[in-house]
Amino acid sequence: MMARGVSKTKVYEAIKQRWLNLNPGKADRFCEGSPYYLKELNDNLVEPMYDRVQRSYQAGAGRELDKDMQALHSSAAMTYNLFGNRPAYLYDGETYRAYTVTYEKQLTALNPTAKAHLDACLSRRDELLLFEMKMTEWLSNSHDPLPASYFSSEKKYPDWDLFVGLKMTRDLFHTDAGEKGYAPRAKHLDTAQLFKHVYAIYNALFYTGELPLTEKVKLCLCVWTISNPSFFDDPAQYDLYVTAEQELHEEFEAFRSRLSDLIGMMEDRGVRFDVELLTVGELISRMHKSDQLKRYLC
């Protein structure tokens, strides 16, 4: 069960029906016993992966190529289908900007052996766009806690003591640590993951050299959304979904509002940093790929 009664099964069934409508006569492509997984990875991809892209995914922590990317609801497959093998072109309202795409970008946060993994990194001469992609995961009301080491008084890296003291740490997590760490207060926003990503980006820019010191850097949380009430065969499910999406936006704004100190610190060091929540539909529109990616426009 997903948040507030949104049924995971109904979401998956509707995603599958959308795929079948766009791919008539291919119902036999699904695995027996795994009704939302395709037998062949390429059936879930817009185009076959180049070898270098496969190597990026093979090096990632999730090992998506083993099976995960064969799921219709796979965020990794969605990420690849959006950005593909070649440079990505995003329209900013005036012109197209070309970006080199790297998948499964690994950055050091607190533990060098357990790095933060960004789903995609788009780079150009003066700009970095780092993407965390979510298809259906954000609808879940279950996210990993922030390890207790992140609030430890022990100084792990330069500026860590300043980082912990920033406003962004306040009220985002429950104050008592559980067995696995501090549970986030948000229902839909993966707050612990975003917190780690933000620190890893800061660390990578100014200390580890894992990212080039770039004038503009943005962390983009890109979520798949549903805009058509008829996506579900049950209108009540869409109402529950709408509530969940509204809550996600509220949680993200609460997170972003705590970044002002950090943004100021980074601007003083020559980097304009920000975070953004955008929908997959908005990203597809910026890339002018609506015809190729209809399956994600629901």
Image (cartoon, rainbow, N blue to C red):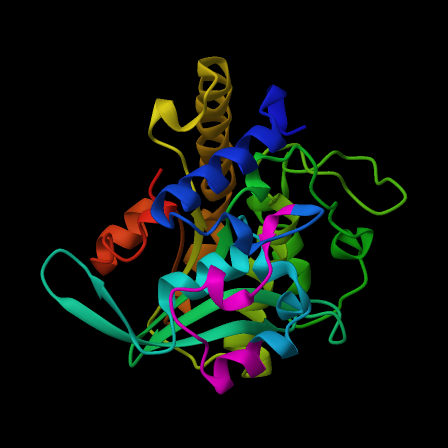
Q: Does the segment drawn in magenta span residue 284?
A: no
Instruction: From the viewer's side, name the closer residue of 264 and 213.
Output: 213
Name the spot of residue 24 as percent of width and height, x first: 38, 47
Name the spot of residue 6 as percent of width and height, x first: 58, 24
**For the view shown, which residue lies furthest in the top direction?**
236
Quadrant including the N terminus: top right
**Position of 64 compared to 298: left or right?**
right
Q: Does the segment drawn in magenta span residue 54?
A: yes
Q: Is residue 46 above or below residue 237?
A: below
**Position of 292 compared to 149: left or right?**
left
- Which residues, given as a range, are shown in magenta? 35-56
Q: Can residue 215 be seen in this view?
A: yes
Name the spot of residue 114 as percent of width and height, x first: 74, 70
**For the view shown, which residue lies furthest in the left direction?**
94
Name the spot of residue 7 as percent of width and height, x first: 60, 26
Q: Quadrant of residue 150?
A: bottom right
Q: Which residue is drawn at 63% across and 59% down?
A: 68
Q: Is residue 254 above or below residue 164?
A: above
Q: Is residue 189 visible?
A: no
